[in-house]
């Protein structure tokens, strides 16, 4: 509340300073201009709106509902990522374009012992599909998985990349089926079900808790 009052005060002082430095436009009735009220700046008093079929009283209720991206980045993590980003030019100067690799992210050497790289223009990625359900709830069918694979391949059509279903499995576990983001249930499920290597894609389906999509 004090921060909003301070903001309104700064706006008022800025308008006053402008009025003393230059003459007002004769075509504008300055007496009719109004500064935004504290209620207008408060998300809890904004007008109701609808999102994804759900009616919210205001922006404050939408924020409190938790229906947003599950990734919560702390200030420390932001600073760490910014530090890494700042080092990228130096990294590229030493190692070159780290996107210039062959195979599945593995550098390729030329003949005769000489080193060499070529830019990756495409490839096939193995997909491991894990269906986590509680009884019949959330139990996708093989047809559902095939349809999702088609959507995935259609999205990357023309890029040179394709996805192939390497394996699929079904796990009936009520605790895992309702796992929340960053929960012990999520870590346990992924640790037990994950297949392949870092070159492969693991997809997990579940009735994720916490209002996440």
Image (cartoon, rainbow, N blue to C red):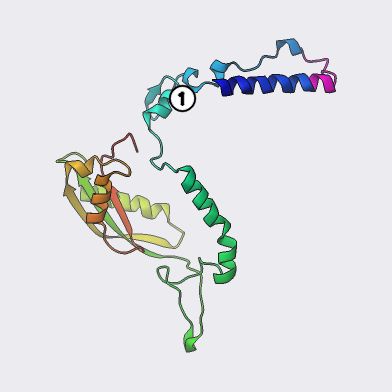
The residue positioned farthest toward the top in the image shown = 31
Left or right of 52 on screen, residue 175: left
Q: Quadrant of the N terminus?
A: top right
Which element is circle 1 on? helix
Q: Position of residue 87 (x, y in %)?
A: 56, 60
Q: Nearer the viewer, residue 50 or 155?
A: 50
Q: Quadrant of the C terminus?
A: top left
Q: Quadrant of residue 26?
A: top right
Q: Position of residue 190 (x, y in %)?
A: 26, 52
Q: Residue at x 62, y 17 (%)?
A: 36
**Magenta-highlighted residues:** 18-28
Where is 96 relative to 193, above or below?
below
Mark 1 closeness class: few <14, some 14–19, many ≥20 residues within 10 Å: some
State the residue position of label 1. 59
Q: Residue 140: tell me if it is visible.
A: no
Q: Residue at x 30, y 52 (%)?
A: 203
């Amino acid at each position: 509340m004090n921060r909003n009052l301070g903001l309104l005060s700064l706006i008022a002082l800025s308008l006053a300073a402008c009025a003393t430095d230059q003459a007002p436009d004769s075509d504008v009735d300055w007496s009719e201009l109004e500064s935004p009220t504290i209620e207008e700046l408060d998300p809890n008093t904004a007008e109701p709106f609808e999102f994804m079929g759900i009616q919210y009283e205001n922006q404050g209720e939408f924020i409190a509902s938790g229906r947003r991206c599950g990734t919560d980045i702390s200030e420390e993590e932001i600073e760490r990522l910014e530090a890494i980003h700042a080092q990228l030019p130096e990294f590229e100067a030493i190692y070159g374009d780290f996107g210039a690799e062959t195979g599945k992210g593995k550098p390729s050497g030329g003949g005769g012992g000489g080193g060499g790289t070529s830019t990756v223009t495409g490839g096939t990625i193995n997909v491991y599909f894990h269906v986590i359900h509680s009884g019949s709830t959330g139990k996708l069918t093989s047809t559902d998985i095939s349809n999702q694979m088609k959507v995935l391949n259609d999205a990357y059509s023309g890029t040179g990349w394709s996805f192939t279903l390497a394996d699929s499995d079904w796990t009936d576990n009520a605790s895992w089926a309702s796992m929340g983001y960053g929960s012990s249930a999520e870590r346990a499920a992924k640790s037990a079900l994950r297949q392949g290597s870092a070159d492969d894609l693991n997809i997990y389906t579940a009735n994720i808790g916490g209002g996440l999509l």
